[in-house]
Image: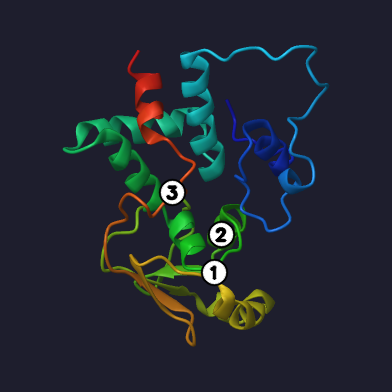
Amino acid sequence: MARYIGPKCRKCRRYGVSLCGTAKCALTRRPNPPGPRPLRRRKISDRGLQLIEKQKVRYAYGLMEGQFRRYLERATAREGVAGHNLMRLLEERLDNVVYRMGFGATRSQARQIVTHGLIAVEGKKLSIPSARVKVGQAISFTDRGRKSGFYKILQEDIAARDIPAWIELDRQNLTGRVIAEPGPGDWESFFNPNAVIEYYSR
């Protein structure tokens, strides 16, 4: 199945949480799921609830099913809690790190910044959103990125954005560094990674 490129807030309304990351999410105005209202509410099975949790994580990070399965395989092969390993791998993606640094207002925007060649890792341009950012690596804008109009707008907006503790950010120069591995509490609280693992363990 290809990556979803339809209306972002449609998925937010479907799953009842803001997955798009925008401040003006349609979920706040239209909390009901998309489509006609059912005549009667159907009870969702445990398997269905696990599927919903999996889809929430997958859509939030913008992954295809095959990509997501590969992350799951890597997570279960590691020592420790598989669910936490999965979320840690997703948080270490370059597009997500750029988003967490506040360079992108949403993960979709951060992905676009990366693919357009505006981001450098350790001083070298890297345009692969799925690239893993390791502890100690520095993130900055390329020369082309610093000359863009987006860079000038970001210099004004970056002051109001919250940065997680596992990232160190120089707001004046718009450079950042990953100083620790993300852990429980560093990703959105509405994710249930254990349910995702249970879904694939059947």
Name the spot of residue 76 as percent of width and height, x first.
25, 31
Q: Amino acid at mark 1?
A: Phe
Q: Which residue is mark 3?
A: 130
**Amino acid at pointer 2:** Ala
Please name the residue shown 43% across and 33% down the image.
Answer: 68
Residue 103, quarter of the rendered image: bottom right
- SS category of the residue bearing label 3: loop
Mark 2, Cα crowd under 10 Å, few <14 / some 14-19 / many 20+, is many
Q: Is residue 132 left or right of residue 55?
A: left
Query: Separation of disc 3 and disc 1 at Cα?
Result: 16 Å
Q: Nearer the viewer, mark 2 or mark 3?
A: 2
In the rendering, at what x and y percent does residue 196 appear? 40, 28
Mark 1: secondary structure: loop
Residue 103: numbered disc? 1
Residue 102 x/y as whole percent: 52, 68
Tell me which corner region of the image, top left, top right, bottom left or bottom right, holds residue 31: top right
Instruction: Quarter of the image for the N terminus: give it.
Output: top right
Identify the residue under disc 2: 110
User: Which quadrant is the C terminus positioned in?
Assistant: top left
Question: Going from the N terminus, do you reach mark 2 or mark 1 first?
Answer: 1
Q: Are marks 2 and 1 in contact (CB under 8 Å)?
A: yes
Residue type at tag 3: Ser
Q: Is residue 202 above or below residue 148?
A: above
Query: Which residue corresponds to the image point at 49% horizontal and 42% vertical from the top-left?
Result: 190
